[in-house]
Image (spheres, helix red, strand yellow):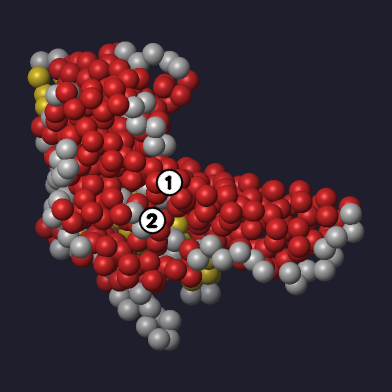
Amino acid sequence: MNIQQAKEQITGAVRAYLSKDDIGNYRIPQRMQRPIIMFGPPGVGKTAIASQIADELGINFVAYSITHHTRQSALGLPYITTDEFDGREQRVSDYTMSEIIASVHRAAKESGVAQGILFLDEVNCVSETLAPAMLQFLQFKTFGMHRLPDGWVIVCAGNPPEYNRAAREFDPALLDRIKRIEVDPDISVWQSYAASAGVHPAITTFLDAKPSLFYLVRQDVRGPHLVTARGWEDLSRMLQTYEAEGIEVDEHLVGQYIQDEQVALEFGAYYDLFRSYQDDYRIADVLDGAIDDGIVQRLHDAAFDERIAVVGMLVDAQLERVHALAGEQEALAHCRSDIQTLASIADPSDVQDCLARWIRDATRESAHASQHASATSYRAHAATRRAQILEDVRQQVAKSAQQGQPSFEAARQTFNDAVDAFEARTTSTMASIEHAFRFLDEACGDNSQEALVMVTKLSADPALVQAVVEHGCPSYLEHSKSLLLSERELDIARRIEDLKQQAHDVLPKLG
């Protein structure tokens, strides 16, 4: 199955394992919860989806590569203690807590959430000395003397033997005690993820044109050649950072991530061409409605590869704006609740203490989400923006206190100003989508293949579909209909939005 299907299967299993009955007992006792083990080639996203599932379910995520562990670190260190048997005191061996089990307890303590996913990578590549303990853990959920706490689900990943010389097959007795999921690379699924995750448009458009180069693992006399989904995404982040810092990208950088000389050379040449398109087409101006006739004519005369590259740049720029808007909306929803709490606090110093605590919490959440959340999550951006808004509120409340004015009034006005700014950004963001479609219609004709590519990529992004449902976008809807995209997508999005409306209903100002 592809990585999206694997994610759906694992999400269902984790939810089932964490499900409780009316009296609080787990419906599936821990001893009957089979560990979930994904097998697939390296770099297809096995670790990423486990992290995403934990993030989406709001539970902890603790990850270990089991090949980095010795028997002592996994089981704990032995020590001598005493116990009483048949009325006589005896010296016996005991073990300190396993580093892995201790990390699980530590994560639960720090987060305040009792449940989580324990992810063990390269599970079929453990050393000979650790293999028996690993098998015991998978079967009985204990490392040495210590058991995995209730509410923690074991998710593992392994590489088939053809990709890892150290890999070994599990015996039939163990296979009968696990949930085995086979994962295969699938470029169509990855491209949908890549659009939402902000993967560099040079990469997504290159792979649109040459999908056979998405994933490659082969061996020759010079060693292994690796082109993986992980490699493309890591290269994307480096390209974006190099561009932000004004550092030149060369074939050596590309080859450090795309470890096949021919593929690296092809992408390097394409990237140079793509950069020239970025300079020539001025995408930001197009989205702002400043559509130059010369640029329209150039795209009209361009070859299909160049047109698709421009579509990739348009999609990337639109999704960047929409994702920022989604993060802002989530931040405002949280801030609205925060500020309503201030209405019941009379002492200005107590108001300042509350605001300072919320700012610290938001800053901490932003840092945590940046390190651990999935790329498609807006939690980091939302938490950062929440901290910024609350800091503005804190400063205005301090000024009002000096002038003898009510704290809540200053907080309310600052929040309402932020809502006004959000509404203006919403209007300009939805207009930019209209401008992008108008540009393609003028350059490529009505209902063009280029417009089909753009609306398909945009439709794969949940935040953009939600923005269309909430705020409307006639050009998007018209192209969706004319290009035979299913209306059911928007119907589903509307129902999802109805369920989420309480969490995102930030447009009403505080009275």
Q: Is residue 373 found left or right of 141 in the rendered image?
A: right
Residue 271 x, y percent position in the rendering: 27, 20
Q: Which residue is mark 1?
A: 429
Q: Which residue is mark 2?
A: 467
User: Marks 2 and 1, how far apart in space?
Assistant: 10 Å
Residue 44 x, y percent position in the rendering: 23, 41
- The mark lying in front, picked from 2 and 1, is 1
Q: Are marks 2 and 1 in contact (CB under 8 Å)?
A: yes
- Between 487 and 367, the residue placed more toward the observer is 487
What is the secondary structure assignment of the residue under circle 1? helix
Which residue is at a point 82% across and 68% down the rendered structure image? 346
Seen in the picture, residue 294 relative to 158 is either above or below; the reply is: above
Q: Given the current orientation, which residue lies at the most extreme front position?
A: 293
- Can residue 123 be seen here? no
Q: Amino acid at mark 2?
A: Ala
- The image quarter containing residue 116 is bottom left
Which residue is at a point 15% across and 45% down the rendered structure image? 447
Q: Amino acid at mark 1?
A: Thr
Disc nearer the start of the sequence (2/1): 1
Residue 452 x, y percent position in the rendering: 17, 44
Which residue is at a point 50% across and 47% down the rendered structure image? 425
What is the secondary structure assignment of the residue under circle 2? helix
